Amino acid sequence: AVRLREQLRDIDTVARLGGDEFIILLPGLQQPSDADNIATKLLNCFAAPFQAGEHEFFISASIGTSLYPKDGCDVATLIKNADAAMYRSKAKGRNRVESYTRDLTAQA
């Protein structure tokens, strides 16, 4: 979570959902591309390995985004839609960003 926090603004919120899943709230974005740019920045922060004692660990990340109000008007819907986008990211090979689209809900 420290690496995530270092990439974000003071007004952003990082919370662990469980296991290896985090949710990040990015208030005040002006364009949908702003979310993609921040998500790409987050992916890049995992490019360097983590050091633990004498061991190096390489981390991959799969990121799904959803935008208020386009992709949902309540927290539960936004999380569900971001989760669907994240699973599409994993299915496409990890270490990538996918944005929610309505076809993901239709496939479910």
Image: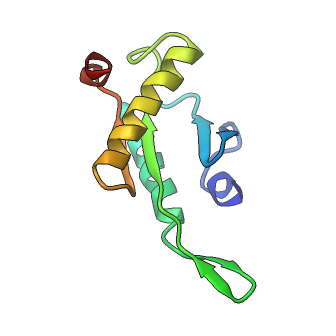
Q: Viewed as shown, does residue 28 lie left or right of 18?
A: left
Residue 77 pos. (x, y %) = 49, 15
Q: Is residue 66 visible?
A: no
User: Farthest residue in the right direction?
Assistant: 53
Q: Is residue 94 above or below residue 54?
A: above
Residue 11 pos. (x, y %) = 69, 36
Q: Quadrant of the N terminus?
A: bottom right
Q: Residue at x 48, y 47 (%)?
A: 38
Q: Residue at x 28, y 19 (%)?
A: 102
Residue 13 pos. (x, y %) = 68, 37
Colouring of the image:
rainbow
Q: Is residue 25 above or below residue 76?
A: below
Residue 27 pos. (x, y %) = 59, 29
Q: Looking at the image, which is closer to me, 79 or 45?
A: 79
Q: Residue at x 67, y 40 (%)?
A: 18
Q: Is residue 18 visible?
A: yes
